[in-house]
Image: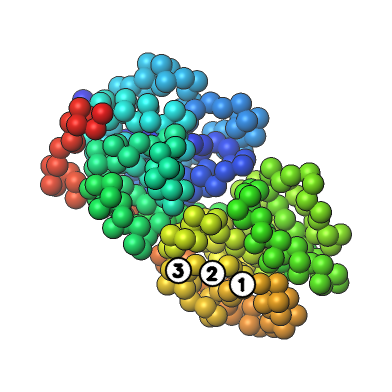
Amino acid sequence: MRCDDIVVLGLSLSSSWGNGHATTWRALIRGLAELGQKVLFLERDQPWYAANRDLPVPDFCELGLYGSRAELYSRYGSRIAEARAVLCGSYLPEGIAVIDDILALVRGPCGFYDIDTPVTVAALARKDCDYLAARQIRAFDFYLSFTGGPMLGLLSDRYEARRPVAFHCAVDAERYQPVAVPPRWDLGYLGTFSADRQPALERLLLEPARRLPQCRFVVAGPQYPDDIAWPANVTRIAHVAPAEHPAFYAAQRFTLNITRADMIAAGWSPSVRLFEAAACATPIISDDWPGLTDLLPAPTAILIAEDSDAVTHILRHVSDTARRRMAAEARSIVLKAHTGQARARVLLRLLDALASASVPLMPVSSVR
């Protein structure tokens, strides 16, 4: 018998340690819950997440942990088969094998939420993507893409995605709000270490810190190598739990947004941190990429900096009045268009349209 639940299989919901997926899933699923939609989230029980769980028992959905593919199907196979819809996420452990199994099992619509679209497409082109096979894309009823713009046409034309939809990350508006906290840092950055982001961090934060010894800076996030030479006026924090993000953002005069190289090349790929900072009314300095100013116009809602000189100028010369005005504009834009509930409405409208069209799943034999 069919049920009304949406079943989600993703990297992690219970732990935000070392990944940006958890907060994205939380915002979307909370949004679905606010609209009355029940969700079962299925997560591989990984030791590094088990040791760092900041949401072990969510109050907005059901969380199911599994230790292996066999346990996934023995415990949850019937729930997957009878779900209103199934949504698989990028970086799903053993993703290719799991997706093959899911496509053979589901009876309702099945979609893919790619929270890493440019990374995925680059890996597919190299034929080394370990969580999604190119042959699987055309089997999904819909493909939710972190990246908008021309990427949607590429997914359709090259990979035969049937319904590619721009589906940027979103913020939980109830949990990301301005907080009255005294400023501690002039500029901060929140993000896990990434080798391709490190040159931008060096250019847009560490070098300005060296030039402005009277200012204070902060870099928060795990996995940074021990051999990085941090200036004396840069505070290092290994991890900031999502519940502490608003206060962390509020303690910064500006926060820095840095984008991975694949996402700069693709454009139209806003990170969840961008929307979180905006929702908390923290002024944002960002690197530049196509589509950014379509989301947050510059300089009214965001400031763009390409080099150390630009960041140094901003920190020295932008007034508090201008900062607050810019932050208020960014917050207004994000609350209107980029919350978890806004994304949830898009997903539910899509599922309603699929139900009305009664489009069957492509037989799994055609994608193997």
Crowding at label 2, few (<14), some or many (≥20) Cα neighbours within 10 Å?
Answer: some
Quarter of the image where the N terminus is located = top left
Is residue 190 shown left or right of residue 168?
Answer: right
Q: Secondary structure at mark 3?
A: loop
Residue 35 vertical placement versus 62 (above, below): below
Mark 2 sits on what residue? Answer: 288
Location of residue 4 (image quadrant): top left
In the drawing, what numbered circle is on residue 290?
3
Q: What distance separates the C-alpha of mark 3 from that of mark 2?
A: 7 Å
At horizontal 35% and vertical 57% (from top left) the residue drawn is 151
| 70 lies left or right of 312 | left
Q: Amino acid at mark 2?
A: Asp
The image quarter in which residue 368 lies: top left
> Are discs 2 and 1 less than 8 Å apart at CB?
yes
Residue 153 in percent (x, y) is at 28, 58
> Would you call the spot at circle 3 few (<14 residues within 10 Å), some (14-19), or many (20 or more)?
some
Query: What distance separates the C-alpha of mark 1 from that of mark 3?
Result: 14 Å
**237 and 232: which is toward the camera:** 232
Q: Identify which residue, 8 or 203, lies in the foreground.
A: 203
Q: In terms of secondary structure, where does tag 1 sit?
A: loop
Q: Position of residue 257 (x, y in %)?
A: 60, 63
Question: Secondary structure beneath disc 2?
Answer: loop
Across and down, in percent, residue 221 comes to 68, 48
**Kind of residue at badge 1:** Glu
Disc ID at residue 306:
1
Which mark sits nearer the N-terminus, 1 or 3? 3
Q: Residue furthest front?
A: 126
